[in-house]
Amino acid sequence: MKNQTPSTLFEYHLMNLQSVCLQADEVFVCPLCFTVFSREEVSDPNKVNLGHIWPKFLRNTGEDDTPKHQHVLLCKSCNSEAGYRGDHEMQEVEIARQGDKSERPTRKRQIWIRPKTGEPDVRLRAYYRSVDEKSATIRFQDHPNAFKYNERYLRYNEYARSQIPCDVIVYPHDANWQLAQAGWLTSAYLFAFYTFGYRYIFHHSLDAVRDYILSSFDENVDRTLDYEADKPLSVRTCAVHYSSQPNIMYMIPVVGTKQIHFIGVDYLDYHVRLPGRDNHLVAQENSDEPDEEVQLSLAAKGHVSHAERCHWDDLFDPVDYCVIGTTLVARKSMET
């Protein structure tokens, strides 16, 4: 959807919300913090903003302009916090990664040079590029006199001229990978909201996603998002698969297994898993175990949340949260 404004996006979100929650007033629910805003509050930019799903560097990296036109509404607080934290860090990581692949890296690395002959170690910051498995290049600065009086550089230069054999340890980039993972999780979650709407995010299975995203605003991150085959929530890169525009699929294992099913979001060489409606399908009794790798994938390319019911809604019903009037409630509290 091009030429989006907060008012037009509000109408899209409202139609979708009221198709899920028949008793909802004209309100907007922030998909991250679940704060409810009235129509009047949505028109106040100090309360609700237009939010890009993908940060600027990422949406300009692919081969088409599709990501540039993918937006959702967010409350100003969530929009700002996401931009300052994970959104910023995921760009820093990708800028560094792409620089490493080029002939002139754009980010310095900490490098530890350890002579095998017993001379003192040298620790430096420099531009590092791996050429192949056996060779690499180290570039310090373009200006020839930049390190003229730097003791560590002069020592390294002496080792290089004398061809002293050395072990070279290259440290990771300074960027926070766990915070970058949180940024990718946020974008993938918002892309799922953009695609499927409230009928998807109004589930308890997404509580852990929202909690982790909100915690990342205070830079509280850990290795929760590291990939494991049986986890419904993860962020990783893959050297084999590449997608020039964001793709989203619902991955369902064959009936008869307890393998997880999940939402898969792919963009560039990043792969994000989000929980599906349930954590796994119930295994059939007395059935042979099928190949664990066999899954059905339902592609949702081009799908955008809307008011009319479609086959995607059958995957996500019933929801665990609902809006009654201007109040967001959990189904369990309604039943009691």
Image (cartoon, rainbow, N blue to C red):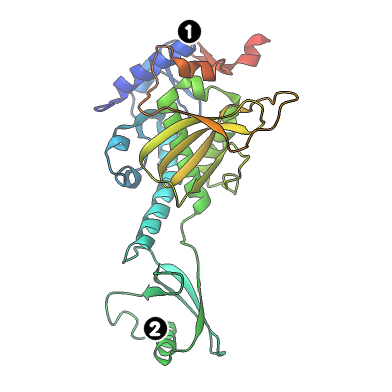
Q: Dot 2, crowdedness within 10 Å: few (<14), some or many (≥20)?
A: few
Identify the secondary structure beneath mark 2: loop
The answer to whether 202 is drawn above or below residue 51 in the figure is above
- Quadrant (top left/top right/bottom left/bottom right) for the N terminus: top left
Report if the CB atoms under discs 1 and 2 are less than 8 Å apart: no
Q: Residue furthest bottom?
A: 162
The structure residue drawn at horizontal position 40% and vertical position 35%, both measured from the top left corner, is 247
Q: Amino acid at mark 1?
A: Leu
Please say if 39 is above or below 206: above
Q: Quadrant of the C terminus?
A: top right
Residue 57 as seen in the image, left or right of residue 155 = left
Spot occupied by residue 134 in the image (x, y as percentages of width and height): 45, 74
Q: CA distance from mark 1 to mark 2?
A: 70 Å
Q: Which of pointers 1 and 2 indicates the residue nearer the eye?
A: 1
Horizontal and vertical percent position of residue 42: 36, 22
- Image location (x, y in percent) of residue 290: 65, 33
Q: Identify residue for label 1.
A: 22
Check residue 208 in the rendering and tell me which mark sits there, or answer none. none
Residue type at mark 2: give it: Asn
Instruction: Place residue 301 in its image quadrant.
Output: top left
- Left or right position of 70 against 210: left
